[in-house]
Image (cartoon, helix red, strand yellow):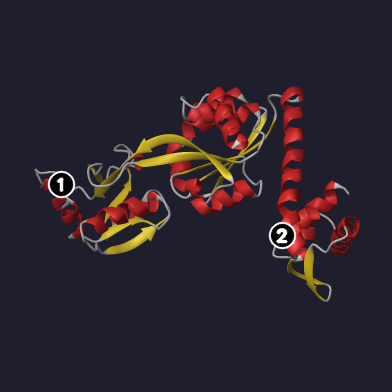
Amino acid sequence: MNFQQLRSIREAARNNYNLTEVASVLFTSQPAISRQIRELEEELGVEIFTRAGKRLTGLTTPGKTLLPIIDRLLLEAGNLKNAGKDFKEKDTGVFYVAATHSQARYALPAVVRDFRQIYPGVTLHLRQGSPQQIADMLLTGEADIGVATEALADYEQLVTLPGYRWSHSVIVPPDHPLLQQTAPISLEDLARHPIITYEHGFTGRAHIDEAFAREGLAPEVVLTAMDADVIKTYVELGMGIGIVASIAFDPERDRLLRAIDARHLFEINLTRIAVRRGIWLRDYAYHFIESFVPTLTPDVVRQKLNEDSDG
């Protein structure tokens, strides 16, 4: 038994049993992948995959039992390497952070800047995606930590840590009638106008929909986007009012727009930091998290990871 065999099994399951794609991922040939799989099956005395001729079609019942064990073995092998690097190459490495556009654009820049100054020998890759894509990146090892508002807490395989709380704002052109109101705006006020906001699953959209639903309102959402920059662009064009994360509005940068505080209308949102359960984080990853959320010191994070691991 060797790690190349285990990787071949894992990647076959990840890549829809397409051995051509597996060979590309592992930088080898398709016959080599087939041989690695067959050799492990022969050693274990069971078939891991179902087949149609020579083509893999799925996992057998033994395969479904063995795959999580294979994942854990490969995870621990990676942990062993990272633990060694923390002693031998403490301030060098490659660090992958996955975040939604809003987090990458508005919440993380200062953290990334400070991290680069402290750890110039660490190459940081910032990957963007939806909350679901971020979770997938964490589970497949394509990211070390993930930052998002929604969805991350829904995955049992992830350990999530509380980040910062934030609210929404309504953005409008400078001459919009909502700016003339003396009383605080209401959901009924917003529902009288076309609305531009986030796509479902992004940046607190669920709380926006829930607030209108509780009041029995069905607002006209004329456009959705994954990030606030796009929303602001179409608000500037007069297509509707925007509902965005408050952090996404900057009076200096967004001079053609005005923001109205909407924290009294929508539930407060919580940005979460997530890592794969059982992962060994490099020391610099702990310091990145602390820089982002000062209350999440390395000791606090390690304690949380150990608690979840024990549980």
Name the residue carrying label 1: 179
Judged from this view, the residue extending furthest toward the bottom is: 53
Give how far across and how far down residue 303 sits, in percent.
57, 27
Task: List x then y, in percent, for residue 309.
Answer: 62, 36
**Is disc 2 placed on a helix, strand or loop?**
helix
Numbered disc total: 2
**Residue 123, position in %: x, y?**
65, 35
| Tag 2 residue | 64
- Front one among 237 and 74: 74
Q: Amino acid at mark 1?
A: Leu
Is residue 113 visible to the viewer in this orientation of the structure? no
Q: Is 80 left or right of 30, judged from the image as shown?
A: left
Tag in front: 1 or 2: 2
Tell me the number on the disc at residue 85. none
Q: Residue at x 90, y 56 (%)?
A: 43
Q: Residues within 10 Å of mark 2 (few under 14, many from 20)?
A: some
Measured Cα–Cα span from mark 1 to mark 2: 59 Å
Q: Is residue 302 left or right of residue 165?
A: right
Residue 48 location, quadrant: bottom right
Circle 2: residue type:
Lys
Residue for point 16% across, 47% down: 185
Residue located at (84% from left, 73% from top): 54
Element under disc 1: helix
Based on the displayed image, in which of its 4 quarters is residue 166 positioned?
top left
Depicted 4 relative to depicted 119: above or below: below
- Callout 1: few (<14), some (14-19), or many (20+) C-alpha neighbours within 10 Å? some
Q: Quadrant of the C terminus?
A: top right
